[in-house]
Image (cartoon, coloured by chain):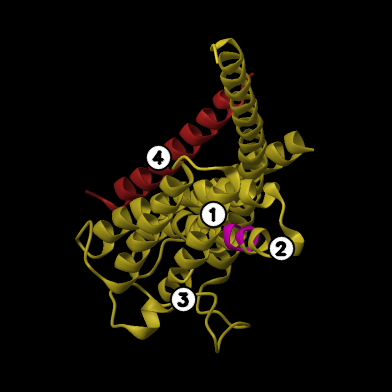
Chain colours: A yellow, B red
Amino acid sequence: MTRVLGIVTAALLAVTAVMALVVSPPDAVQGDAVRLLYVHVPTAWVAMYLSFGVTSLASALWLWPRTRRRSWDLLAGASAEIGVVFIALTLAVGSIWGRATWGVWWTWDARLTTTAVLLVLYLGYLALRRVPADPDTRARRSAIAALLAFVDVPIVHQSVVWWRTLHQQASVLEENRLLHPSIHGSMLWTLLVGLTAFTLLYFWLLVHRFRLARVEDEAEDRRLELALAERRAEADVVPA
Amino acid sequence: MTSASYVFGGYAVTAVVIAGYVWWLLRRAQP
């Protein structure tokens, strides 16, 4: 099943590349630079809404006593790591696009700054997960940190509305124009195919990262049991 | 630089980062 998902994802990513680089037209104002949209928006979608959303949901499910399972903690960590990769990509591609259209690689604009803060918050979250502690303590503090970090996501989303910013407003998810987005038809289709391809890529990565997290978790348990057995053996041979 | 150079740079960065992450993930999953 995972292999089928991988093949479909790779095929759809190839279709996205062809549509983005060949089929869709250049923008009337930006020219070819607009083609960066088809990478920048999907990576932001995967990072902010999918990855960090799943991390928050899994963290909340761990914190809720009735649904508490170790798997939720592992899923939260796995999804956050993918989110960090994709939010870093969003910033990198956004920086290249900024240089092409604004003339600068970086500016302390509200959207850019709040997104950079998001990267730092989730890097902190991943660092927190590596601090040695028993699994329950680590899961509890990670879950709380994940929910606190997610507060920045709606701030990033609304930053182009709340503050004066260089970054453009939403092209598709506009409150008053959901059925009539201000984007050309072929551009919109390319963007939708790109969003679908990157969404599938996220789930494929999540399956693999979650499996790895389980293996690492079981290995940690085995190391702990081994260490305890060694301590007990030492205690047996030490004279009273 | 031309717009095409920036587009190439953006797509190249994306491809390298994702391929690198996939490679790291599959390598670590090896028994």
Compute the Cα span from label 2 to label 4: 45 Å
The chain containing the residue under callout 3 comes to A
Residue at the location (29% across, 66% down)?
A: A113
Compute the Cα span from label 3 to label 4: 25 Å
Instruction: Tell me the amino acid under the disc marked 2.
Output: Pro
Mark 3 vs 4: CB contact within 8 A = no
In the picture of the structure, the residue carrying the numbered disc 4 is B12
Characterize the local packing of mark 2: few (<14), some (14-19) or many (20 or more) Cα atoms within 10 angstroms.
Answer: few
Whether residue A129 is situated above or below residue A170 in the rendered picture: above
Instruction: Tell me the amino acid under the disc marked 1.
Output: Val
In the picture of the structure, the residue carrying the numbered disc 3 is A170
User: Is circle 1 on the same chain as circle 3?
Assistant: yes
Characterize the local packing of mark 3: few (<14), some (14-19) or many (20 or more) Cα atoms within 10 angstroms.
Answer: some
Q: Which mark is residue A63?
A: none
Region rendered in magenta: A55-59
Mark 2 vs 1: CB contact within 8 A = no
Instruction: Tell me the amino acid under the disc marked 4.
Output: Ala
Judge depth for marks 1 and 3 and give the one in front: 3
Residue B4, how many percent across, how many down? 33, 49
